[in-house]
Image (spheres, rainbow, N blue to C red):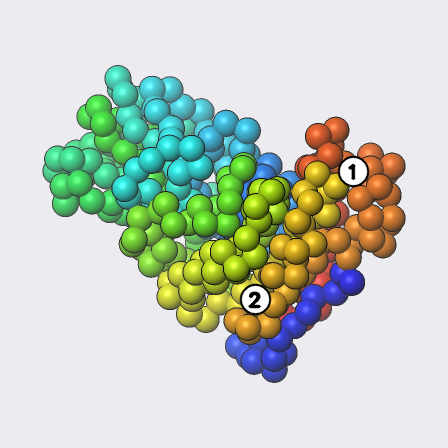
């Protein structure tokens, strides 16, 4: 069934009553949503449809340093030169920030960051690291303001906070200086951001630094966290249900440590015929939702309303690889998910 399975609804609704926004008609004066997931979220199509159907956004939230190849963000675009970008999906680093992306400057590197859907001034926190203290980046915004980022503690991730107008350009003053992400927000921020990685397994968060969750969640209030892993785990011919359970459970606990008040929703993956253990993964997530007092949503329920996978294929919503969906398919899921949650939160 496509409905949300809610656990202890009275507790779920506590503190989440809708609040009117006379200026924009949004249901919440401030509301943050974080998505964690794999390639089904990597194009941002599902998440952007969720944003458009859930609230009127006024902020961006947390954004990785840059978008790795084949990934997109419908809120932000990057034009960079001279940065080496690595991802925790395929690379190793002992201290990946949240979302697992690091951009390291080479030969006078620069990056221009532009907002696609929003405009005006924002509070911007830039995550950076360098082996030596001192000025490492110059920031110039759309108003012509120029500011400098200084590394205070050698070899540690730090945030520098500014009020900026987009687009902004960040220029490296030192080879080897690193960027780890950005927080972009306003007062009473309404946003939905994501940590999505193509090909990611549910335990990818274990490759991020020990302080990533608490540090990179800070200053952004997340009311809802949506966890949508399972496709890559379930494609493994040796899929281990207990290992998958413990992996997602560990992520839930990391989220709750960083954002104790956030409600959590687990989303089961589509039932592609090329993902033999998708139904088993869904059953694990449903059990975990009960055990952890979370919510659960099964994408298969929505798809079954139109004939399941074969029905969506005939409607042109399935990609030729028979694992992923077309943009319109992801948009249908995002809109349906927003509708389900709007009626409950």
Q: Which of the pair 236/71 is nearer the observer?
A: 236
Q: Is residue 218 above or below residue 236?
A: below
Residue at image x 59%, y 72%?
A: 290
Residue sitting at x 42%, y 33%: 90
Seen as rendered, the residue at the extreme bottom is 10
The circle on residue 259 is none
Task: Report whether residue 205 is seen.
Answer: yes
Residue 198 spot, x, y in % from top left: 54, 36
For marks 1 and 2, the one nearer the N-term is 2
| Residue in front for this viewpoint, 10 or 174 | 10
238 to 173, vertically: above or below = below
Image-based side of 141 in relation to 11, left or right = left
Confirm or deny contact between disc 1 and disc 2 (CB under 8 A): no
Q: Position of residue 100 (x, y in %)?
A: 39, 41
C-alpha distance separating marks 1 and 2: 29 Å
Toward the viewer: 211 or 193?
Answer: 211
The residue carrying mark 1 is: 317
Count of residue discs: 2
Other residues around mark 2 within 10 Å, as few (<14) / some (14–19) / many (≥20):
many
Q: Quadrant of the C terminus?
A: bottom right
Can you give x and y, in whole percent of width and height, for residue 94 in the image? Answer: 27, 42
Is residue 193 visible in this depiction of the protein?
no
- The residue beneath circle 2 is 288
Most foreground residue, 143 or 91: 91
Please state which of the two labelled residues, at mark 1 or mark 2, is closer to the viewer.
Answer: 2
């Amino acid at each position: 069934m496509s409905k949300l399975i809610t656990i202890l609804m009275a507790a779920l609704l506590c503190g989440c009553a809708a609040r009117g926004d006379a200026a924009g008609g949004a249901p919440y004066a401030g509301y943050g949503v974080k998505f964690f997931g794999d390639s089904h979220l990597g194009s941002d199509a599902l998440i952007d449809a969720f944003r458009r159907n859930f609230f009127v956004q006024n902020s961006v939230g947390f954004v990785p340093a840059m978008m790795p190849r084949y990934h997109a963000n419908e809120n932000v675009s990057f034009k960079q030169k001279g940065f080496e970008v690595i991802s925790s999906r395929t690379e190793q680093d002992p201290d990946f920030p949240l979302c697992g992306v690091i951009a390291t400057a080479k030969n006078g590197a620069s990056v221009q960051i532009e907002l696609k859907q929003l405009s005006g001034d924002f509070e911007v926190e830039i995550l950076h690291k360098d082996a030596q203290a001192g000025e490492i980046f110059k920031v110039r915004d759309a108003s012509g303001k120029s500011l400098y980022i200084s590394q205070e503690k050698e070899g540690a991730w730090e945030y520098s906070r500014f009020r900026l107008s987009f687009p902004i350009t960040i220029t490296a003053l030192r080879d080897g200086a690193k960027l780890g992400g950005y927080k972009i927000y306003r007062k009473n921020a309404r946003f939905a951001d994501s940590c999505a990685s193509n090909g990611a397994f549910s335990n990818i968060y274990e490759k991020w630094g020990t302080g990533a969750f608490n540090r990179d969640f800070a200053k952004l209030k997340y009311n809802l966290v949506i966890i949508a892993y399972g496709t890559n785990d379930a494609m493994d011919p040796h899929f281990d249900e207990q290992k998958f359970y413990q992996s997602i459970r560990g992520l839930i606990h990391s989220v709750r440590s960083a954002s104790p008040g956030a409600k959590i929703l687990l989303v089961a993956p589509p039932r592609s015929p090329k993902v033999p253990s998708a139904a088993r993964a869904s059953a694990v997530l449903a059990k975990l939702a009960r055990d952890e007092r979370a919510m659960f949503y099964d994408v298969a329920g929505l798809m079954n309303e139109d004939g399941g996978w074969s029905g969506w294929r005939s409607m042109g919503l399935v990609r030729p690889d028979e694992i992923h969906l077309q943009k319109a398919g992801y948009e249908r899921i995002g809109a349906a998910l927003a509708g389900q949650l709007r009626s409950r939160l």
